[in-house]
Image (cartoon, helix red, strand yellow):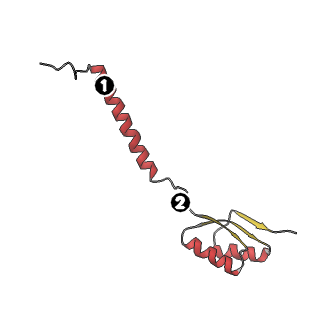
Amino acid sequence: MRDEKYAINRRQFINSSVTAAAALAATTVSAQSYNRILGANDRIRLGGIGSGDRGSTRLVAAQKLGAQIVALADVNKGMLERAQKALGAPVEKTYVATY
């Protein structure tokens, strides 16, 4: 004897199955792609102001720890170039103060 309280027809069964499968697929894709997303706390971007001897040494140390150096500023163009050379990687933006 069939209990009418829990009975569903074929169309309702297929509809609920497809909905459940789609929801499962969406969470699986989201979970997989979530691991590739870097959040604000996972990435450190630094800019150096006054990147002379002491400043460039600290920037190099930060770079070795995984920070990305994105900008440098100095009043002395020679020191700015020296800091870029010490970092080894090109810096996105550089600024020399002019008076």
Dot 1 crowding, Cα within 10 Å, few <14, some 14–19, many 20+: few
Query: Residue 77: percent from the left, percent from the top?
Result: 79, 74
Task: Identify the residue shown where x is 79% and y is 75%.
Answer: 76
18 relative position to 33: left or right: left
Which residue does the image show at 32% across and 28% down from the upper left?
Answer: 16
| Left or right: where 34 falls relative to 80 | left
Q: Is residue 61 left or right of residue 93?
A: left
What residue is pinned by disc 1? 14
Residue with the mark numbered 2: 41
Seen from the viewer's position, the closer of residues 90 and 32 is: 32
x and y, in percent, of residue 21 in the image: 34, 34
C-alpha distance separating marks 2 and 1: 43 Å
Question: Which corner quadrant holds the C terminus?
Answer: bottom right
Q: Are marks 2 and 1 in contact (CB under 8 Å)?
A: no
| Quadrant location of the N terminus in the rendered image | top left
In the picture shown, does residue 72 fall above or below 52? above
Name the N-terminal-most of marks 2 and 1.
1
Q: Label 1: state its secondary structure.
A: helix
From what the image shows, is residue 99 above or below residue 10?
A: below
Is 94 placed above or below 50 here?
Answer: above
Quarter of the view holding residue 65:
bottom right
